[in-house]
Amino acid sequence: MSEQLIIKGETKQERYDALLPQIEAVLEGESDFIANMANVAAMLHETFGFWWTGFYRVIGEELVLGPFQGPMACTRIRKGRGVCGTAWVKAETQVVPDVELFPGHIACSSASRSEIVVPIWQEGKIIAVLDIDSAQLATFDETDRLYLERIVELLVNRVGNKR
Ligand code: SME
């Protein structure tokens, strides 16, 4: 696999369709969860030019910052707090068109205007979340939810597998 991301496509769906096989190729060659979270964050970030793209891992009763791309961020989020903590407690993807209207939103950065948080499941438990922030309102929709849920499933399927 070359280390050059090649993304063509006008629409969001076309860009995800171009990205998916490249994510699969990267995950195919590596089973370490942190390494794979790091490359998935980088590939999503580069493809779409999001404001912040990264992971929080479930550690005890908190989410703890994992690999990400973008400005520095809050390191720990308590269960149920913010969009990330809500996605964890409700055990479902949160699509937030305007973070200022989301009760309890944690503003790690005032530039963040909309957000999607996707829980990552392993053996019936949420082990991490993928959090993506945009500097524009209403960036994320059902297309993002479907593709990002697929991407985190690919990611977790690599954990514990042999190379
Ligand atoms: N906005 C998030 C906090 C994490 S940062 O934005 C990277 C939230 O409310 O969960």
Image (spheres, helix red, strand yellow):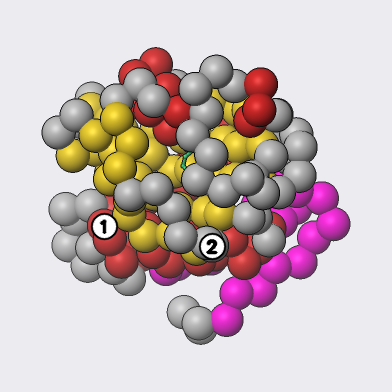
Of label 2 and label 1, which has the lower sequence position?
1
Does residue 163 appear in the picture of this structure? yes
Q: Amino acid at mark 2?
A: Gly
Horizontal arrangement in the rendering, residue 23 relative to residue 30 (left or right): right
Place of residue 28 in the rendered image (x, y in percent of width and height, measured from the top left): 35, 65
Q: Which residues are magenta?
A: 4-26
Say if the magenta span includes residue 123. no
Badge number at residue 33: 1
Q: Amino acid at mark 1?
A: Phe
The local secondary structure at tag 1 comes to helix
Place of residue 91 in the rendered image (x, y in percent of width and height, measured from the top left): 37, 20
Horizontal arrangement in the rendering, residue 105 relative to residue 143 (left or right): left
Location of mark 2 (residue): 70
Horizontal arrangement in the rendering, residue 35 relative to residue 53 (left or right): left
Horizontal arrangement in the rendering, residue 163 relative to residue 140 (left or right): left
At horizontal 39% and vertical 48% (from top left) the residue drawn is 74
Q: Is residue 92 above or below residue 64?
A: above
Does residue 87 appear in the picture of this structure? no
Place of residue 155 in the rendered image (x, y in percent of width and height, measured from the top left): 36, 51
Q: Is residue 1 above or below residue 36?
A: below
Q: Residues within 10 Å of mark 2 (few under 14, many from 20)?
A: some
The local secondary structure at tag 2 comes to loop
